[in-house]
Amino acid sequence: MAATMLTWFLLSCLLSCEAYSVKKPIVRRDESSSDDTTYVMAVTYELRNDVDRHIPPVELKLELPVGSTIYDVMVEAAQKDWRCGFGAVPNADWGFQIDSVGGVAGSSEKGTFWSVERPAYHPITEGVDKVAVTDGDHVVLRYVIEKDSCDP
Ligand code: B12
């Protein structure tokens, strides 16, 4: 009888532990770094020109420290691939605005701009330096033509 009760007690304990377990983020140690506290995340970065489809897209797989923002992803990409060089204008209210990527500049006359999305077709709702990335994220900068409005 005592043994049966003990078994039930242990079983219910195990089940409740499972119900409250928290899924930890998947991060890998940066083996090349001597800093024990540095963890890296894998992020896919893509440039796409939807105004001139003759320009081929660029896609990079990058590794960045935990806590990086989309701005950090863009800096890393620019260091890895010249086609990812970009221009950013600081804005007192919103942070950085990206005005050109790979030598292609947004133009208010033409109504073109670089839409920042994560993932594709899901525009971010803040500036690139305000949005943190997580492991497995797919960040897309899409050159688009739009009316003079913004509906992130
Ligand atoms: C028009 C507009 C745009 C236009 C600006 C160009 C143009 N030709 O006018 C376009 C379509 C390019 C645009 C883009 C974006 N925008 Co916008 N935009 C607006 C809007 C509707 C009006 C701004 C305006 O004309 N103000 C009047 C003028 C006189 O003031 P201004 O200070 O000179 O305005 C400039 C800045 O606002 C700047 N700007 C516009 N959007 C953004 C976004 C960021 C992050 C920065 C730094 C600057 C900036 O462009 C304006 C013209 O030069 C505001 C909403 C609002 N009501 O304020 C959103 C708004 C500023 N945008 C916003 C966002 C998120 C974006 C995007 C990041 C969306 C995306 N996912 O791609 C992108 C920026 C991407 C990049 N390349 O960095 C958010 C900012 C939120 C925040 N708290 O940070 C706002 C507040 C909309 C919202 N309610 O969420 N935008």
Image: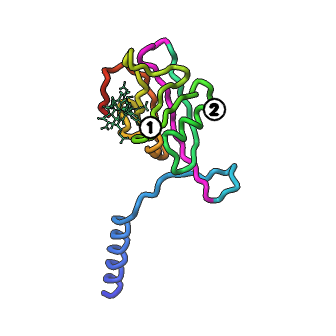
User: Farthest front residue?
Assistant: 92
Residue that numbered label 2 is attached to: 80
Which segment is the magenta one?
A: 37-54
Work out which quarter of the rendered image holds the N terminus and state it. Answer: bottom left
Q: In the displayed structure, does residue 105 sit left or right of residue 108?
A: right
Q: Is residue 40 above or below residue 1?
A: above
Q: Main secondary structure of the magenta part?
A: strand
Work out which quarter of the rendered image holds the C terminus and state it. Answer: top left
Q: Secondary structure at mark 1?
A: strand
Q: In this figure, which colouring scheme has been used for the structure?
A: rainbow
Q: Position of residue 139 (x, y in %)?
A: 46, 35
Q: Nearer the viewer, residue 143 or 22?
A: 143
Residue that numbered label 1 is attached to: 91
Identify residue type, mark 1: Asn
Q: Is residue 26 above or below residue 125?
A: below
Q: Is residue 88 above or below residue 107?
A: below
Q: In the displayed structure, does residue 2 sit left or right of residue 34?
A: left
Residue 141 placement: quadrant: top left
Q: Position of residue 3 (x, y in %)?
A: 35, 84
Q: In the displayed structure, does residue 135 sit left or right of residue 39?
A: left
State ligand 1's quadrant.
Answer: top left
> Around disc 2, counting alpha carbons within 10 Å, would you say few (fewer than 14), some (14 to 19), or many (20 or more)?
few
Q: Residue at x 40, y 31 (%)?
A: 120
Q: Of tags 2 and 1, which is closer to the observer?
A: 1
Q: Is residue 42 magenta?
A: yes
Q: Residue at x 47, y 42 (%)?
A: 129
Q: Secondary structure at mark 2?
A: helix
Q: Position of residue 143 (x, y in %)?
A: 43, 22
Does the numbered disc 1 mark a residue whose Cβ is under 8 Å from ligand 1? yes
